[in-house]
Amino acid sequence: MKSKLLSAPYIVWMILFTLIPLCIVFYYALTDSITGEFTFANLTSMGTYLPIFLRSIWLSLFASLICLVIGYPVAYFIAQCKPLTQRFLEMLIMLPMCMSFLLRTLAWVAMLEDTGIINNFIRSIGLSPLSLIRSNGAVILGMVYNYLPYMILPLYTVIMKIDKRLVEAALDLGCTPKQVFTKVILPLSGPGILSGLTMVFVPAVSTFYISQKLGNGKFYLIGDAIEGQYVANNLHFAAAIAFILMIILLVCMALMQRLANRKLIVA
């Protein structure tokens, strides 16, 4: 009885801020904007948005892989440091997350725009300025910068939990450091890799502010489409796009979870 009372605030929170909003999205997505009758028209008329979905998924996947390539060595390095150094480096990684997401993105705009810091420096040394903003690369850079901590932290947590005796046993059996990493550390850090990929991909695929500022409106993503329909007061179509996005995210998360379970079974 006591445990049920303790869980009551969580249940109320889930109902108010998760279940009810989801039901509202489903209602708007599956009803007509004029008559309010049940319909699939909002979903079936979304063929023109297929390139936007594909672009969003591709950019998010690419940003997630870059975060993995950068984040894994960083997480591994932190895990090998002394405890005091680990805490300091953890603080440095989490520090940008304490700052507004908008300010972090605007900082990159100030550096990459045509009259920004980088191009002003290039002009000062007598070279022609570069077109750094309004590109796929700028959008991916914004995603990587903003979501890299979501990759590093789960990787670091998993690597720290690896039993050091397994590494020592592999070395005693004659494995080289490279073999220890590829045969012991990397497979055991698989759950952290999958968790990090999920935590980066989910917010990246639904972002809109990064594409608006670093893509300068040139690269339209799913989040931009939802916002555009909402601003135009087309709530039913905006809800339909959000509905499809939720299905994509649920499928991706289910695949990640299945892959993680398979790795645990093999291990």
Image: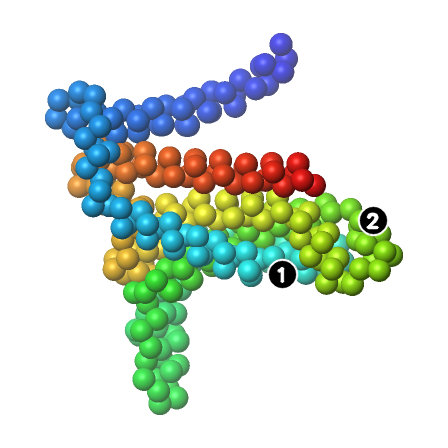
Q: Quadrant of residue 116?
A: bottom left
Query: Vertical placement of 197 versus 27: above or below?
Result: below
- The picture places residue 39, in percent across and down from the top left corner, at 20, 25
Label placed on residue 165: 2
Total label count? 2
Q: Of 22 and 266, which appears nearest the observer?
A: 266
**Where does the image place residue 92, in percent across and percent down from the top left?**
59, 58
- Residue 35 image label: none
Residue 233, image x, y percentages: 18, 37
Judging from the image, what secondary structure is the residue with disc 1 in? helix
Residue shown at the point (51%, 51%) measured from the top left:
97
User: Please, which residue is most extreme toward the left here?
Assistant: 34
Q: Quadrant of the C terminus?
A: top right
Closer to us: 129 or 124: 129
- Badge 2: how crowded within 10 Å, few (<14), some, or many (20+)? few
The image position of residue 51, as x and y in percent, is: 27, 50
Note whether residue 78 is visible: no
Residue placed at 42% from the left, 27% from the top?
A: 18
Measured in 3D between alpha carbons, the distance from the residue under mark 1 to the one under mark 2, in whole angstroms, is 21 Å
Query: Which labelled disc corresponds to residue 73?
Result: 1
Q: Which label's residue is closer to the chain start, 1 or 2?
A: 1
Q: Toward the viewer: 211 or 262?
A: 262
Going by the numbered disc 2, the residue's amino acid type is: Arg
Q: Is mark 1 in CB contact (under 8 Å) with mark 2?
A: no
Q: Is residue 130 above or below residue 12?
A: below
Q: Amino acid at mark 1?
A: Pro
Q: Residues within 10 Å of mark 1 (few under 14, many from 20)?
A: some
Q: What coloring was used for the rendering? A: rainbow
Residue depicted at 45% across the width and 40% down the height: 252
Q: Residue furthest right?
A: 172
